[in-house]
Image: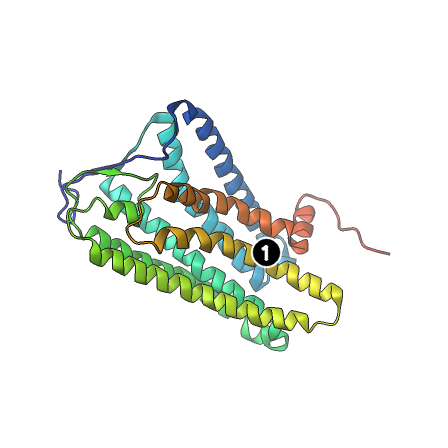
Amino acid sequence: MQGGNGSWVSHFTLVGLHHPPQLGAALFLAFLLIYLLTVCGNGLIILTILLDTRLHRPMYWFLCHLSFLDMTISSAIVPKMLAGFLLDSRLISFGGCVIQLFSFHFLGCTECFLYTLMAYDRFLAICRPLHYATIMTRGACHCLALGTWLGGAAHSLFQTTFIFRLPFCGPSRVDYFFCDIPPVLRLACADTTVNELVTFVDIGFLALTCFALILTSYGYIVAAILRIRSAEGRRNAFSTCAAHLTVVVVYYVPCTFIYLRPGSQEPLDGVVAVFYTVITPLLNPIIYTLRNKEMKAALRRLGGVRDVQPR
């Protein structure tokens, strides 16, 4: 059973979430509902931004990319998980495992870069308002967004190639609910010390660098906001930035827990992974719509509710 790259494994078995068998149907319905809400919520944000010309600004174009990433990350993981709950279909082909791992890290790394880009956009808008229009032009906006996708693809291609060059001769049980770097590495029939070190350095460097840039941007932003004399102006600026910071924290904390502890096999890893692969994509549209007055107004207009103009 030649699986490619010198491997003797043609399929992997995803163990999935450790749960009592009688909870399978309930978990299926719960995750199905979360997935449908994730797709609908993020799809509604994309539709609203595309149709409402008042939102055709860099901040909302980047939000459009973020919503698309959340939809696709969830779609790369959850359908296979649902099949495991409903049909007890836990087999995934060797090629399918490669594609799932590549897709997840491609989309996840792109999202990491996008959060940094969104922080830079808010830095320019608040700290360099007079230069914002000349710096963040439509062309620059599209080039920067494209750069996040290319960077994510390059990172994921490197990680995927570096892992699946290893031989896999059995066992083939992935003690996880999807193909990710740590559980797949444990199945390799070779010494994985170098792979674990490279994963730790590569993902750690990218995550910590992006996080440091985000914190630096928001350090300048907070200082600029505190200089605003109007209390209403300070509130509006803080409200816009708080949504982004909340999403960043929700994204980075679980990722740090999983990938910056080489060789970890704690059962809690699966619970944390569920949070950032299933729950976080659902939280993002909620956070951005509830804390953003322009998005709420645009959603009302999309639903045919006219804005009430003060007299």
Q: Residue furthest right?
A: 311
Question: What element does badge 1 sit on?
Answer: helix
Which quadrant is the N terminus positioned in?
top left
**Residue hosting label 1:** 243
Q: Residue at x 21, y 56 (%)?
A: 193
**Where on the picture, by quarter, is residue 109?**
bottom left
Expressed as whole percent of the image width and height from the top left, the position of residue 17 reads: 37, 35
**Residue at (47%, 49%) from the top-left corner?**
70
Q: Position of residue 183 (x, y in %)?
A: 28, 45
> Which quadrant is the C terminus positioned in?
bottom right
Q: Residue at x 48, y 50 (%)?
A: 68
The residue sitting at 40% across, 55% down in the picture is 256
Left or right: 154 in relation to 288: left
Tell me, yes or no, if residue 231 can be seen here: yes
Residue 289 sits above or below residue 202 on the image? above
Q: Is residue 174 left or right of residue 48?
A: left
| Location of residue 136 in the rendering, given as x and y in whole percent from the top left corner | 54, 71
Report the front residue among 68 and 189: 189
The extreme top residue here reads: 22
Q: What's under tag 1, amino acid-wise?
A: Ala
How many callouts does the rendering have?
1
Using the image, determine if residue 101 lies above or below residue 153.
above
Q: Residues within 10 Å of mark 1 (few under 14, many from 20)?
A: some
| Quadrant hosting residue 24 | top left
Q: Is residue 226 left or right of residue 29?
A: right
Nearest the camera: 215 or 68?
215
